[in-house]
Amino acid sequence: MIRCERRPPVNRGQTIFSQVIDFLPQNKFRQCVNRYNGNYRVRSFTCYDQLLCMAFAQLTYRESLRDIECCLRAMREKLYHTGIRGKVSRNTLAKANENRDWRIYSDFAQVLIHEARQLYVDEDFGLELKETVYALDSSTIDLCLSVFPWARFRKTKGAVKLHTLLDLKGDIPTFIWITDGKVHDVNVLDHLVPEPGAIYIMDRAYLDFKRLYQLHQCSAIFVTRSKTNTGLRRLYSHKVDKSTGVRCDQTVVLTSYYSKKDYPEKLRRIKYFDADKGRSFVFLTNQFTLPPAIIAELYRYRWRVETFFKWIKQHLRIKKFFGTSENAVKTQIWIAVSIYVLVAIMKKRMKIDLTLYTILQILSITLFEKMPILQAFTTDAYKNKFTSGHIQLKLFGS
């Protein structure tokens, strides 16, 4: 069977926005909508219209529903050609975000994530390893408890938490779990489906030996930091090259009753001195064959998931929400993730040699211009404006 690859869109008098949207697999989106009866009794403003309006808001950094409405009305003559068929008003969009099942956009984000991972499967993330490497972490978005009463965090404070598993090949978020702020980080391990042979990098917040043993039994590999009060007994010490920063490489077992019961097998303990930071780190892993310096270097790549959180908070609309219900907040977050992944797909398919930040900046000012999309990213007037004077976060390469 011949496999046909979806080609980049060809401009035929289309706006830049229309060409970006052409990268969306619309048949897959319709399947997600039908799965949850998203268009039940909908006459004009469909789920697809909602997606496009929210995508427009993300790409142009709109501040509010009124802001979205005003901008789209100013572009009234071009709306039909961008694919938005229904009448756009802030009340209509607010009701759609409030009432239409957020799982439509969650499922669609997974469709895009699957496509992006296939495109970036051969991407080099810095270490030559055949295993898939994931970084696991969470980020908290503060909310006003009186406005978002469902998102309880502390007594007088609200928050939502994004628990994210990031594939380091391409920095693609492969798993996202959205909870209120009081859910502890370690609980996400109960919702992950471990991939045999994959490496999971996580900090000390995930040091729960019962859950780590479940990862081990699924043939997954974990690398995490040890706590100072973790009881360990050394079985063997292995020779190390201290010039690499490695101070010790040991095979150990847990000593406390409950920890030993939760994780009855051997662990590997590596102590590493980071000369740049002037401090030592102690790692625990169930990987016994990689050189200890590689294990330490693996943990260093955990910063990529923190960069991902910083990036989407700065450049997409997930800190300021257009609705106050749980459904509206989750809808907005999942559409923001979809746009992040969509632009990553577009960058790879069109071989655009710019950072994701620069691509989004150029899109924000050219969205309703009629030109071939590649022209926008090769025109010096646009490139020079956004590639100078900015600190670039090098997601998806440079």
Image (cartoon, grey):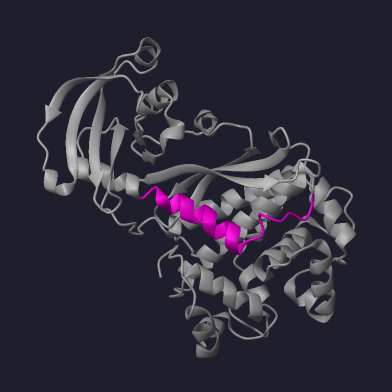
Q: Quadrant of residue 299?
A: top left
- Asked if residue 1 can be seen in this view, the reply is no
Q: Position of residue 31 (x, y in %)?
A: 68, 49
- Residue furthest top as drawn: 257
The residue lying toward the viewer, choosing from 30 and 170, is: 170
Pick the quarter of the image with the N terminus.
bottom left
Looking at the rendering, the stretch of residues picked out in magenta corresponds to 301-323
- Asked if residue 261 can be seen in this view, the reply is yes
Does the magenta run of residues contain 312? yes
Q: Is residue 170 left or right of residue 157?
A: left
Q: Position of residue 158 (x, y in %)?
A: 71, 40
- Residue furthest front as drawn: 278
Q: Is residue 176 above or below residue 91?
A: above
Please tell me which residue is depicted at 57% across the width and 58% down the height of the picture.
Answer: 312
Please tell me which residue is depicted at 76% across the width and 77% down the height of the picture.
Answer: 81
The residue lying toward the viewer, choosing from 327 and 268, is: 268
Please tell me which residue is depicted at 33% across the width and 49% down the height of the picture.
Answer: 300
Q: Is residue 75 above or below residue 166?
A: below
Q: Is residue 361 above or below residue 376?
A: above
Q: Position of residue 334 (x, y in %)?
A: 65, 51
